Amino acid sequence: MVNSLEHTELLRFTTAGSVDDGKSTLIGRLLYDSKSIFEDQYEAISQTSSKRGEVGVNLALLTDGLKAEREQGITIDVAYRYFATPKRKFIIADTPGHTQYTRNMVTGASTANVALILVDARHGVVEQTRRHSFIASLLQIPHLIVCINKMDLVDFSEETYEQIKEDFSTFSHRLDVKDVEFIPMSALLGDNVVEKSTNMDWYGGSTLLYALENVHIGSDNNFIDCRFPVQTVIRPYSDDYHDYRGYAGRVAGGVFKKGDDVMVLPSGFTSKIAKIDTYDGEIEEAYPPMSVTLLLEDDIDISRGDMIVRPNNQPDVTQDVEAMLCWFNERPLQPRGKYAIMHTTQEARCIIKDVRYRLDINTLHRDEDNKEVKMNDICRVQLRTTAPLLTDPYRKNRITGSIILIDEQTNETVAAGMII
Amino acid sequence: MNTYQLNHLRELESESIFVLREVAAQFENPVLLFSGGKDSILMVHLAVKAFHPAKIPFTLLHVDTGHNFQETIDYRDALVERIGANLIVGSVQEAIDNGMVREETGYNATRNYLQTAVLLDSLEKGKYDAALGGGRRDEEKARAKERFFSHRDEFGQWDPKNQRPELWNLFNGRKLYGEHFRVFPISNWTELDVWQYLAVENVELPSLYFAHEREVFKRDGMLLADSEVLPRRPEEKLEKKMVRCRTIGDITCTGVWESEASTLEDIIAEVSIARQTERGGRADDKRSETAMEDRKKQGYF
Ligand SMILES: Nc1nc2c(ncn2[C@@H]2O[C@H](COP(=O)(O)OP(=O)(O)OP(=O)(O)O)[C@@H](O)[C@H]2O)c(=O)[nH]1
Ligand SMILES: [Mg+2]
């Protein structure tokens, strides 16, 4: 049992799409049909469903667990759910479709390998479909599966499916997405979720579960550019480990090997890796997303926020950052406003020097005239930071390419940023 | 699959260690909430790994209802001794004695709800700015909504409708004076992951988790352990059964399950085919549809 686990991969996926397109129902259906629901959970939601006078069991209740969500019949915040098949383990983030809660959608999507974009077959591609697809592409989610849902309400029409597929493709060609797949389904009835639909013989593709089990995720990490942001310094101060000084962190990119020449940024000092340490003993190499402790041959002043890299492959060391921002806060972006900024394990302050443009989600038009950035808007900005950041373009590395902005008065996270 | 691929347990381990290190780096006075259950045992194990060979930089806080299984207390004391940690006990009995909280009465009386007040009081007294909890998102539908870094106001309250966005691995631990964070490093682990990992890592566990003979009785479809703190109704007859715990909380609300599982391998086999969630045996979740959400809003674990 334990041994058969050695090769189980973890896949993280998120849902996206407009309100009521059936995201939560789909997750419920996926869990139910893959037999991942426990009897007491099922009993609890069937009781709630009948109390509310619903016909049948409302599977969306499996993820819509908050009182306020159940009252309104919508998803407000991300729910995380888990299931496994013999092939893979899955972490699902079921996110809200409501525009007001876009920030929660971004929260769920930021760590995903795959995004399921739901489209209501009756309504086709709508503004929120475009917004979420665009966000998924900004976040560089490597794989999109467009789930054309509620096919039962359009007589399982191939024509409708093809039309939506075409509409979506026209739009997505202009996005930066590599891998898009389309599946017609009914989350309510289970068609093409786990079981192949008998109502859509014209569809020759795979079911959703099959697609999730087989999408290739091996290359989603960056194994080329070595990046090790230091989280904390480990100094035991005990007799046995008197001179021990280890740099603890999680590998953000590349493969570090014992004996490698390394450089510490921003200081620029160089050394060699003396040891890659873990609780279970020394290891020969470390790669993403491993948490390890690096020991260097020389005593150098290194602290949290510094980054260990290879001398011949360095990130940008810069106080001027260009980034795409998703704005999350009711209080609009303040031009020339000052915010706290977090990037890997580093914190600094920054000023918004310029809003380059605001993006119109529907047309993808870059608006350079009206640059007022409100909640849920997406824009491109130029930032100036108080200390140099050690950055890569987000396209190259999702960890060293991402930032968040924090309102220094309220401490709220007001924006997510992807470095260009 | 390329050779640079962690299996899911190692990936979860790495994520949790990252979170534990962030807490040590971002907070001045963090505390680890230790209940004696498998999840907090896992959390301690991960913390030991995260800071090895240094000692863990967290004080352990146990909110003791006074209705714990003796095995839990023995295990706790041995663990604290072994890892050289500092333990603080918040006592519900003391809070009852000095009038801070009042005890429930009746057959279904439990001190579970009194823990919140004692927890918040202990956090305030110790001036702790972050409390690490072993909550997992797969446990319960309100827990499924938690962030890793969960902000609490000065009353310790959770506001589920207005949580901070949490992007990538950038955890915003900033707060105003008097506020604190609850941090859940093992958010993404399932019950099965926990057992599989504890087996791979050879972690010693309290004997309660393994099948043993015990006097039990049935209430509301659950089996409860015989104890002087749990008065029985006349029709509730004691029986001897082979049982084990799937979660360990206080005696009054921890259901036990009939089981023959005597090793971790047996437990894994049992959990992977279980038809009931582990909290299906928790009376504290059964009080209403949103019992957990309501408690969490008030500052529960
Ligand atoms: N007929 C039909 N109805 C569906 C299908 N999928 C979902 N629904 C219904 O659509 C409504 C909304 O479903 P939800 O799953 O709550 O939608 P959602 O996308 O999660 O909504 P938000 O999370 O609030 O954005 C519910 O009444 C579902 O029963 C489907 O395939 N066919
Ligand atoms: Mg939903």
Image (cartoon, coloured by chain):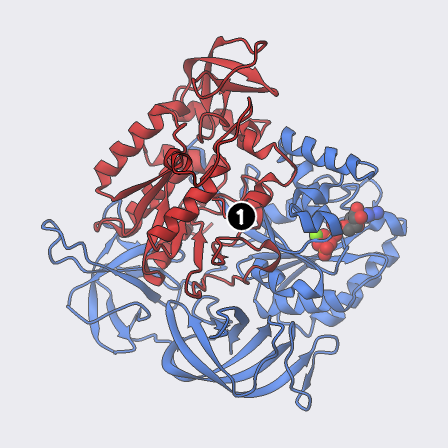
B42 in relation to A17, above or below: above
Name the side, left or right, on which B263 lies relative to A97.
left
Name the side, left or right, on which A173 lies relative to A420.
right
A388 in relation to A303, above or below: below
Q: Residues within 10 Å of mark 1 (few under 14, many from 20)?
A: some
Nearer to us in this view, A262 or B80 = B80
Q: Amino acid at mark 1?
A: Gln
- In this view, the residue farthest toward the right is A155
Badge 1: chain ID? B
Nearer to us in this view, B77 or A347 = B77
Residue in the image at 39% along x and 23% along y: B208
- In this view, the residue farthest toward the front is B99
A104 in relation to B51, above or below: below
Residue in the image at 79% along x and 35% along y: A50
Q: Position of residue A141 (x, y in %)?
A: 58, 62
- In this view, the residue farthest toward the bottom is A369
Name the side, left or right, on which A147 lies relative to A279.
right
Residue in the image at 42% along x and 42% along y: B118
Q: Answer with the quarter of the image where residue A355 lies.
A: bottom right
Instruction: Quadrant for the N terminus of chain A, please.
Output: top left
**From where the camera sits, is residue B93 visible?**
yes
Residue in the image at 43% along x and 57% along y: B180
- Where disc 1 sits, the SS reads helix
> Chain A hue?
blue
Q: Answer with the quarter of the image where residue A244 lies.
A: bottom left
Name the side, left or right, on which B37 lies relative to A133.
left
Give the residue number, with chain letter if any, for mark 1.
B298
Q: Position of residue A408 (x, y in %)?
A: 47, 75
Q: Position of residue B76 (x, y in %)?
A: 30, 33
Q: Position of residue A371 (x, y in %)?
A: 65, 86
**Chain identifier, red in the render:** B
